[in-house]
């Protein structure tokens, strides 16, 4: 672990099966003369920490210096696990996904064929997604395969993203939806030329259609929205790039060698008609081997080679897929199935709204109804009445929220994915009081 986290790991160790801890530092592999200057400035900037003396805690460089290299001779196959990638835990307990060498190598080959206009060794990618997230892993591996320059953004906030775009002029920008939203709302956008961006990829969460159109208008770039999961390395579906048909609001078509089905929500065996919602299931070379140490959950989601995503989707007559919502997020109001994404999209169309997220809350007669949480753009004010009046022209009556709550910010994961689960837990706890 990093020295910055060393003392925390030492305190945590008694609660785990960890026996030995190896400490490293940002400065361990800096080139000369930065390696000499680093200790002088690191403490002032909070980039280094003193780790308390404790048994079975070692310095990485001491270990390397003490022992000569003698790696074991190991036979590695494509079916061996390359990575334990943990899920985000946005819908439940985080699980360790076993991704094999085949999963990861086939995934980057799929991406290379999907983006033929981007040339080997000639592009600059904005690496804004953290590498502990599968989106970051996927884009990193892809850029390594393509021999691209990577522009690392340790703090992917709108100000820093815009500054990097002005300075380094990336040609390919994989971003989470909240990053697109933040860039469009930031005052520095006015002094930033986005024309260097040829293409952008949106993943990790649904991208509001209004945001997609606005970013493409401002930048002139093509945004490709796709769908993936930690369990699919991550990409499984994406809109085509270039001259092929892209459909706003759709996550696109299956990647090469990938088969997608929409099946009934009850048993997951019957294929649904075109345009009818059902659970999206996936078969392809990027699908995980299973969950580490969790055979029961593995058997629940991997059935006869199909990965059951837990996402509700529809397929149109052209074979394009549209994500409706998570099965766990669906609101049942008065017997109707209400999908939070439909509600969120309606409110994102309001010119004052920066972010919106709806959840299901208990209702005395309907069972459940929708509540919407809204973050307004800087300097804007609004009321519940104004928002609901706006929504009435865009939503069926049974989908209309009965409550609106304005917040300064919404809870998010480290990559900016809005935590609907946390909002629901907060709301239910508040109502129990």
Image (tube, rainbow, N blue to C red):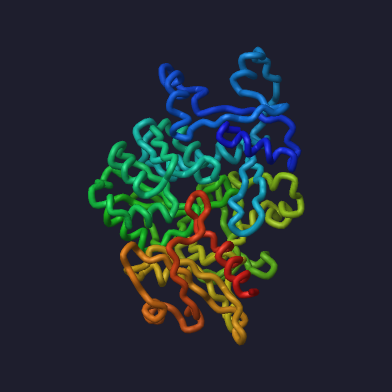
Identify the residue shown where x is 32% and y is 68%: 380
Identify the residue shown where x is 40% and y is 52%: 179
| Residue 172, picture quadrant | top left
Identify the residue shown where x is 43% and y is 17%: 32
Identify the residue shown where x is 55% and y is 35%: 4
10 up-or-down from 296: above or below: above
Q: Quadrant of the N terminus?
A: top right
**Of residues 93 and 293, the one drawn nearer to the viewer in this rendering:** 93
| Number of marks drawn | 0
Image position of 153 (left or right of 7): left
Q: Position of residue 68 (x, y in %)?
A: 65, 12
**Of residues 165 and 54, the one drawn nearer to the viewer in this rendering:** 54
Q: Position of residue 331 (x, y in %)?
A: 58, 74
Is residue 99 among the parts visible in the rendering? yes
77 up-or-down from 360: above or below: above
**Of residues 269 and 209, the one drawn nearer to the viewer in this rendering:** 209
41 up-or-down from 346: above or below: above
Is residue 244 among the parts visible in the rendering? no
Q: Quadrant of the C terminus?
A: bottom right
Q: Position of residue 29 (x, y in %)?
A: 50, 22
Q: Position of residue 131 (x, y in %)?
A: 52, 40
403 up-or-down from 218: above or below: below
């Amino acid at each position: 672990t990093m020295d910055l986290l060393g003392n925390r790991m030492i305190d945590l160790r008694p609660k785990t099966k960890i026996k030995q801890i190896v400490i490293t530092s940002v400065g361990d592999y800096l080139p000369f003369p930065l390696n000499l200057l680093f200790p002088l400035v690191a403490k002032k900037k909070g980039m280094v920490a003193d780790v308390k003396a404790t048994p079975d805690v070692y310095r990485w460089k001491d270990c390397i210096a003490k022992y000569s290299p003698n790696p074991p001779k190991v036979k590695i196959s494509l079916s061996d696990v390359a990575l334990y990638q943990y899920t985000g835990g946005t819908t439940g307990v985080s699980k360790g996904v076993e991704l094999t060498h085949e999963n990861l190598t086939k995934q980057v080959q799929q991406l290379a064929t999907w983006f033929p206009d981007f040339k080997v060794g000639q592009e600059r990618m904005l690496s804004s997604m953290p590498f502990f997230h599968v989106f970051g892993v996927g884009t990193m591996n892809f850029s390594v395969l393509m021999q691209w320059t990577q522009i690392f953004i340790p703090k992917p906030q709108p100000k820093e993203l815009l500054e990097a775009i002005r300075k380094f002029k990336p040609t390919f920008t994989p971003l989470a939806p909240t990053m697109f939203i933040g860039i469009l709302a930031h005052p520095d956008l006015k002094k930033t030329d986005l024309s260097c961006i040829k293409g952008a990829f949106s993943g990790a969460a649904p991208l509001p259609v209004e945001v997609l159109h606005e970013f493409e208008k401002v930048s002139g770039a093509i945004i490709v929205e796709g769908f993936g999961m930690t369990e699919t390395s991550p990409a499984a579906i994406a809109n085509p790039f270039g001259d092929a048909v892209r459909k706003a609001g759709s996550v696109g078509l299956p990647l090469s060698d990938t088969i997608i089905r929409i099946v009934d929500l009850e048993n997951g065996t019957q294929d649904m008609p075109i345009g009818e919602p059902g659970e999206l299931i996936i078969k392809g070379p990027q699908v995980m081997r299973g969950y580490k140490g969790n055979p029961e959950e593995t058997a629940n989601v991997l059935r006869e080679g199909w990965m059951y995503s837990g996402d509700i989707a529809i397929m149109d007559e052209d074979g394009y897929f549209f994500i409706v919502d998570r099965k766990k997020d669906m609101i049942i109001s008065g017997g109707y199935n209400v999908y939070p994404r439909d509600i969120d999209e309606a409110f994102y169309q309001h010119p004052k709204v920066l972010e919106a997220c709806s959840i299901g809350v208990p209702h005395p007669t309907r069972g459940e109804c929708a509540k919407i949480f809204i973050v307004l753009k800087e300097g804007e004010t609004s009321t519940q009445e104004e928002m609901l009046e706006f929504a009435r022209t865009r939503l069926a009556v049974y989908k209309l929220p009965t409550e609106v709550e304005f917040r300064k910010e919404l809870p998010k994961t480290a990559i900016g994915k809005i935590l609907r689960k946390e909002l629901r837990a907060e709301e239910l706890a508040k109502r129990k009081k």
